[in-house]
Image: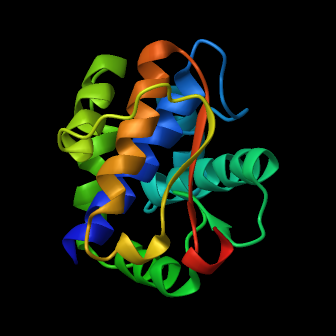
């Protein structure tokens, strides 16, 4: 798998899980919690983590779209078609299971925040609240945008606020 795809998958799971677990939940799911995983395991015994990621991603995508809008804007849970296809392809390979276990098996919220900080790679976004323009989606494959997305989410979770970082095509700015 490409490193940028690995980072996106990790970021989606971490942000999805932290959004479920926030003091005021960002979306109304609990599929990444231990109880939610046990429930999903009964329905999807071999792909429980992938099913959890898909479910929380859909809920998060709806929440982001409601706050940001859809026309020309992308976000962590809804990317341009080529990038979504690359992520989907990676999730259907055997290595994705180990990748998902690496983030799903983190023991608590602090460990998930620390893992998100690693993905932020030293980037910081001040005043992370509400919709936040991060940059163009063209930087996804080069790995320049992913740390900024993660930093915005990290800042929001630390401040116990909601943030919806988004990417906008250059011609729409």
Residue located 55% across and 75% down the image: 170
| Residue 76 versus residue 13 in the image, above or below | below
User: Which residue is nearer to you in this view: 132 or 48?
Assistant: 132
In the rendered image, residue 158, in percent from the top left (x then y), is placed at: 41, 17
In the rendered image, residue 72, in percent from the top left (x then y), is placed at: 70, 73
| Residue 148 versus residue 7 in the image, above or below | above
User: Which residue is nearer to you in this view: 170 or 100?
Assistant: 170
User: Which residue is nearer to you in this view: 126 or 147?
Assistant: 126
Locate the N terminus by quadrant: bottom left
In the rendered image, residue 48, in percent from the top left (x then y), is placed at: 48, 53
Locate the C terminus by quadrant: bottom right
Residue located 29% across and 18% down the image: 110
Do we see residue 58 in this rendering?
yes
Give the side of residue 40 with respect to residue 91, left or right. right
Give the side of residue 29 with respect to residue 49, left or right. right
Residue located 32% across and 27% down the image: 113
Residue 104, located in which quarter of the rendered image? top left
């Amino acid at each position: 798998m490409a490193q940028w795809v690995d980072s996106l998958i990790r970021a989606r799971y971490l942000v999805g899980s932290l959004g479920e677990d926030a003091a005021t939940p960002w979306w109304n799911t609990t599929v990444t919690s231990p109880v939610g995983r046990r429930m999903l395991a009964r329905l999807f015994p071999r792909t429980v983590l992938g099913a959890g990621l898909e479910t929380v991603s859909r809920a998060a995508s709806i929440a982001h779209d409601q706050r940001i809008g859809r026309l020309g804007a992308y976000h962590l849970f809804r990317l341009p078609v080529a990038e979504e296809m690359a992520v989907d392809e990676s999730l259907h390979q055997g290595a994705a299971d180990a990748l998902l276990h690496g983030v799903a098996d983190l023991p608590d919220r602090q460990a998930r925040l620390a893992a998100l900080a690693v993905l932020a790679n030293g980037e910081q976004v001040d005043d992370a609240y509400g919709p936040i323009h991060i940059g163009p989606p063209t930087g996804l494959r080069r790995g320049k945008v992913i740390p900024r997305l993660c930093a915005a989410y990290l800042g929001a979770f630390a401040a116990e606020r909601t943030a919806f970082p988004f990417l906008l095509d250059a011609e729409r700015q």
